Amino acid sequence: MARPFDSDAKALSARVKNCAAPTVGSYLDHSLVSVGYGLPRDVYHYGNAECRPKGNKPPTSVAVKLHRASLEKSSDGSESSVWHWAALAAIHEFVHTGDFIGYNSCAPWQTLQGVRDIKRAGYTESDINKDGFEKWTVKRSDEEYLDTFGVRSPYDPLHSAAAHNKPLPCLFD
């Protein structure tokens, strides 16, 4: 039987947190963070984390928006697929949230620690920018997804639907 998708983005995030996803657990109830559903920018864009104020300043708030319509469109019709995409979106956006708060900057790639960390992760000078940090976020999100669920995320280059599109029981009641 298909399980309903959460009508509330915070409830969806709480489900992912309860599966032991550490970034979601760390930042879901943070005083700076609000969580909600937003509208998709395009079919491949499953959410966004917006840091205020813009620029390389300490954040005064962070808004995580998960794009429910895009998540539902990504489903291939199997019971678990929409939950795989939803879990990945929540983890990915909360990794961004953690960076904003952890680096105390809305542009963490411009901080000395951000530059050091992205170099330590094996990225080159040309990746020390917003796009490079996004690539690193994708990698970290895939790693956390694998650690949390024991299967590879739909975005992971090593993902195989037959091997990894398994039900995620911790997301269901």
Image: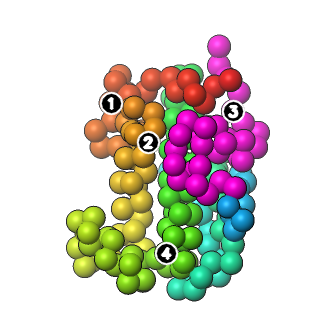
Q: Earlier in the sequence, mark 3 or mark 1?
A: 3
Q: Say whether marks 3 and 1 touch (CB < 8 Å).
A: no
Q: Earlier in the sequence, mark 3 or mark 4?
A: 3
Q: Start and end of the magenta stretch?
A: 1-29
Q: Say whether marks 4 and 2 touch (CB < 8 Å).
A: no
Q: Earlier in the sequence, mark 2 or mark 3?
A: 3
**Quick one: quadrant of the C terminus?**
top right
| Residue indicated by mark 3 | 5
State the image quarter where residue 114 is shown.
bottom left
Q: Residue at x 62, y 78 (%)?
A: 59
The label on residue 160 is 1
Q: Residue at x 76, y 43 (%)?
A: 8
| Residue indicated by mark 4 | 103
Q: Residue at x 43, y 51 (%)?
A: 141
Q: In the rendered view, would you say 128 is above or below 154?
A: below
Spatial separation of the CA atoms under disc 1 and disc 4: 34 Å
Spatial separation of the CA atoms under disc 4 and disc 2: 22 Å
Q: Position of residue 109 (x, y in %)?
A: 41, 77
Q: In the rendered view, would you say 84 is above or below 36?
A: above
Spatial separation of the CA atoms under disc 1 and disc 2: 14 Å
Amino acid type at image mark 4: Tyr
Spatial separation of the CA atoms under disc 2 and disc 3: 19 Å
**Quick one: quadrant of the N terminus?**
top right
